[in-house]
Image (tube, helix red, strand yellow):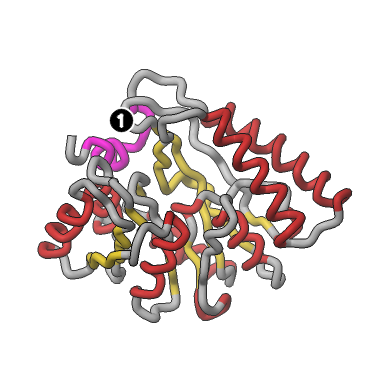
């Protein structure tokens, strides 16, 4: 878990991981030079539960660099999961994904997810994902959300995110699946993704530029093939944005477990 000035949300995010019905896990939080009380909050939780550990980056490294620091500090266990410091897991997230991994033999598992406002008071329809996706399909699809991912390091080897590309998680998923592996998704929403404040339109433009860059510079697609994949990505992203757009004045449609976590610390 990378964290930068995440004091308002990080306790709930960590609690959602500690509340997993799969109890054998460690939570490594990489504080990326926070100037608020993020580190103190993590340390306090770590004193209460030894499964939580705080590490610090050397200077401000950004989300990809901080995530790499956390990965380096983690144990050598087979499975690696990602969780951002403002997102939340459902209690059965890991167990459901591990079960699907055993059933399919897939080394990369993702899931559907909810999208909620920063204050947790609004909810939209869940973003549903396909049951499986291969490398060629993923090139034109932004379906995999970072905080839903569980991957098998015994298959992929050392995991590193490339901080030089703005869409570092998309670059990583395409890189991992380029070897021929098939990713599988749990249809049930197992994560809540908080919508951040700021210009949504500006972020869309930035992400679109980075998707094109990944397709051309990192996956080395021809202009024609990249254009086709980019058009598919843009269409799917627009549909996902519309379906997941918050529409309700309360979080009553969310599962009770998720509502409790969203209320954590309020």
Q: Is residue 225 above or below residue 182?
A: above
Q: Residue at x 77, y 39 (%)?
A: 231
Count of marks placed on residues = 1
Give x and y (percent) for residue 51.
22, 68
Magenta region: 251-263
Is residue 256 in the magenta section? yes
Picture quarter with the C terminus: top left
Give x and y (percent) for residue 32.
33, 57
Q: Which residue is drawn at 21% across and 46% down?
A: 36
Q: In this view, does 251 lie above or below 263?
A: above
Give x and y (percent) for residue 128.
56, 41
In this view, the residue farthest toward the right is: 224
Horizontal side of residue 103 vs 117, given as left or right: right
Question: Callout 1: 10 Å neighbours few (<14), some, many (20+)?
Answer: some
| Tag 1 residue | 119
In this view, the residue farthest toward the top is: 249
């Amino acid at each position: 878990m990378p964290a930068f000035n995440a004091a308002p949300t990080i306790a709930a995010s960590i609690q959602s991981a500690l509340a997993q019905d799969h109890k054998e896990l460690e939570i490594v939080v990489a504080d990326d030079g926070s100037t608020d009380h993020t580190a103190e909050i993590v340390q306090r939780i770590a004193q209460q539960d030894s499964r939580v550990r705080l590490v610090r980056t050397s200077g401000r490294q950004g989300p990809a660099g901080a995530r790499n620091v956390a990965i380096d500090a983690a144990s050598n266990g087979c499975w690696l999961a990602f969780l951002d410091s403002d997102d939340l897991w459902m209690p059965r997230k890991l167990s459901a994904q591990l079960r699907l991994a055993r059933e399919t033999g897939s080394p990369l598992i993702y899931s559907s997810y909810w999208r909620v406002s920063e204050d947790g008071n609004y909810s939209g329809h869940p973003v549903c994902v396909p049951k499986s996706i291969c490398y060629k399909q993923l090139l034109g699809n932004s379906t995999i959300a970072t905080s839903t991912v569980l991957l098998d390091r015994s298959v992929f080897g050392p995991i590193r995110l490339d901080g030089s590309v703005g869409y570092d998680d998309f670059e990583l998923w395409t890189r991992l699946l380029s070897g021929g592996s098939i990713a599988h998704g749990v249809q049930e929403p197992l994560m809540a993704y908080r919508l951040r404040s700021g210009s949504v339109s500006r972020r869309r433009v930035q992400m679109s530029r980075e998707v094109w860059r990944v397709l051309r510079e990192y996956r080395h697609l021809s202009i024609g093939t990249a254009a086709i994949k980019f058009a598919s990505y843009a269409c799917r992203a627009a549909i996902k944005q519309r379906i997941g757009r918050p529409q309700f004045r309360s979080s009553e449609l969310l599962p009770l477990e998720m509502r409790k976590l969203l209320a954590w610390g309020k």
